[in-house]
């Protein structure tokens, strides 16, 4: 592949345009390192998931004061007691959905909007529900600025799902529930999958659920730690 370089006129290295260009180059290097060291080395093998994680600018979903750590190996605060999940967890949960590209996905817990962006890159359509209006509005701005047009953000109680667009081929829950809500399972298409962290305040396990006609089967995958899923079929506001 032919390489192209841009010559910088004398003095332009102090311009805002140049600084932004160099900053984006740095973020791209950090992003590729994240994919190689945090994802591939830990068993993320789905090429489409790796491509999505290598292309989506995670730093744009992180509050400005934490952008230097956007590609670090861990969660980061995004305000209101919420976090953007560790890159590995985002990749793992996405890989567990087994997306092919034609699916309609429901995400519970929009948060920063980063997980929704990864899903939108890999699926046909994403509906995502956020309880907090501030986070929903901020995520909508970032997703719109990046250019995603197949993500639809709804504000409300995520434990109720989003019945107007049901059923869904896949459901991804990005907060911890005491049990897998039946309201969400009922919105799964036959043959659909739901990935959800389930457990107590002290810790949870990531579970994979599948619908087989009127029945559901599930397996526990690994221990995790998520913020609580607040709502009618989740935890109360005080997370007790």
Image: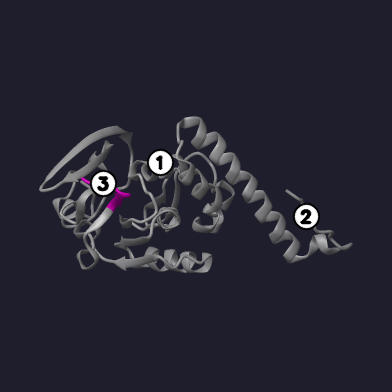
SS category of the residue bearing label 2? loop
Of callouts 3 and 1, which one flags the residue occurring earlier in the amino acid sequence?
A: 1
Residue 43 vs 177, above or below: the answer is above
**Which residue shows up at 50% across the image and 43% down it?**
50
- Quadrant for residue 222, please give it: top left
Q: Is residue 97 visible?
A: yes
Q: Is residue 21 found left or right of 134 in the rendered image? A: right
As rendered, which of 211 and 138 lies closer to the eye?
211
**Most extreme residue toward the left, as rendered?**
214
| Residue located beneath label 2 in the image | 4
Q: Is residue 133 found left or right of 62 in the rendered image? A: left
Q: Are marks 2 and 1 in contact (CB under 8 Å)?
A: no
| Residue located beneath label 3 in the image | 193
**Which residue shows up at 30% across the image and 49% down it?**
175
Find out whether residue 64 is within the magenta segment. no
**Disc 3 to disc 2, C-alpha distance:** 44 Å
Q: Is residue 27 found left or right of 75 in the rendered image? A: right
Q: Residues within 10 Å of mark 3 (few under 14, many from 20)?
A: many
**Disc 2 to disc 1, C-alpha distance:** 35 Å
SS category of the residue bearing label 1? helix
Of callouts 3 and 2, which one flags the residue occurring earlier in the amino acid sequence?
A: 2
**Which residue shows up at 45% across the image and 56% down it?**
121
As rendered, which of 78 and 8 lies closer to the eye?
8
Tell me which segment is drawn in magenta.
170-177
Q: Position of residue 34 (x, y in %)?
A: 55, 40
SS category of the residue bearing label 3? strand
Of callouts 2 and 1, which one flags the residue occurring earlier in the amino acid sequence?
A: 2
| Residue located beneath label 1 in the image | 89
Q: Residues within 10 Å of mark 2 (few under 14, many from 20)?
A: few
């Amino acid at each position: 592949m032919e390489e192209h370089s841009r010559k910088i006129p004398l003095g332009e290295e102090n311009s805002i345009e140049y600084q932004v260009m160099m900053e984006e180059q740095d973020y791209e290097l950090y992003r590729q390192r994240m994919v190689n060291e945090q994802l591939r080395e830990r068993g993320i093998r789905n090429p489409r998931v790796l491509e999505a994680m290598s292309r989506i600018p995670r730093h744009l979903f992180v509050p400005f004061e934490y952008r230097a750590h956007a590609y670090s190996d861990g969660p980061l605060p995004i305000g209101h007691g919420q976090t953007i999940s560790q890159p590995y967890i985002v990749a793992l949960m996405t890989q567990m959905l087994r997306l092919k590209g034609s699916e309609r996905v429901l995400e519970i817990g929009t948060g920063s909007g980063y997980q929704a962006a990864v899903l939108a890159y890999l699926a046909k359509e994403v509906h995502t529900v956020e309880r907090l209006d501030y986070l929903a509005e901020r995520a909508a701005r970032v997703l719109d600025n990046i250019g995603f047009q197949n993500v639809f953000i709804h504000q409300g109680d995520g434990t109720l799902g989003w019945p107007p667009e049901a059923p869904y081929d896949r459901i991804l829950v990005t907060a911890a529930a005491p049990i897998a809500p039946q309201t969400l399972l009922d919105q799964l298409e036959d043959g659909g999958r739901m990935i959800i962290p389930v457990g107590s305040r002290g810790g949870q396990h990531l579970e994979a659920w599948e619908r087989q006609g009127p029945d559901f089967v599930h397996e526990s995958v690994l221990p995790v730690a998520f913020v609580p899923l607040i709502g009618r079929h989740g935890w109360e506001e005080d997370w007790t």
